[in-house]
Image: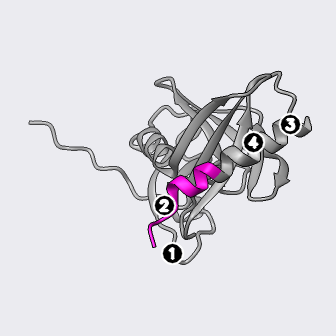
Amino acid sequence: MKLLRRRPKLPAAARPALQPDERVLAWAYVGAEPGGPVAVATNRGLWLPDRARTGWHEIHKAAWSGRELRITPAEVAEQRDGYTVLVDGPVVTYLLLEPWELPDQVRARVTRSVAYTEHHQLPAGGVRVVGRRISGVDGLSWAVRYDSGTPVDAESVVQLTGELVEAAQEATAPLP
């Protein structure tokens, strides 16, 4: 009978500077050599080599190929009244030869951070309105992501986007 392999503890030297209420959920060595840099999933976000923690609400997409974890972070393009305009940041890819639970935790946490999402067609283009949970923060953080080719600075688009975000906020507001 095969003995069950238990995941070893995260080496102390590889442990990122966690906040007092932050805890490690999963981790994996990055690259081909064990003992090298690590990727660490916590209840607050994803720590990647040579990067500060990226909150779950700051990840647009996460994809797992079976060997590589590809992360598309969100970047702030503009701050508007009541919401943020986001764009895709450069995709970062990490080789994980022994991923353990890391890809599953990343997928689950990114998905769980999304409380509301809806795509709307605009007269020219489209916009996705998203309300996301931020660990340790009450309420939702609101953002929009425009389809490619949408005239994001056109006054009518800005006004309609504001109305769509406001409607989403009202629809998700807790009952008094």
| Dot 1 or dot 2, earlier in sequence | 1
Separation of marks 2 and 3 at Cα, in angstroms: 39 Å
Q: Residue at x 58, y 39 (%)?
A: 30
Percent coordinates x, y for residue 34 in the rendering: 52, 41
Does 116 lie within the magenta span? Answer: no
Tag 1 and tag 3, C-beta contact below 8 Å: no
- Is 99 positioned to the left or the right of 94 in the image? left
Other-residue count near label 2 (Cα within 10 Å), few / some / many at <14 / 14–19 / ≥20: some
Q: Residue at x 75, y 48 (%)?
A: 162
- Tag 1 residue: 21
Please indicate, yes or no, whether residue 46 appears anywhere in the rendered image.
no
Other-residue count near label 4 (Cα within 10 Å), few / some / many at <14 / 14–19 / ≥20: many
Percent coordinates x, y for residue 40 in the rendering: 54, 52
Tag 1 and tag 2, C-beta contact below 8 Å: yes
Q: Main secondary structure of the magenta part?
A: helix
Q: Amino acid at mark 3?
A: Ser
Tag 1 and tag 4, C-beta contact below 8 Å: no
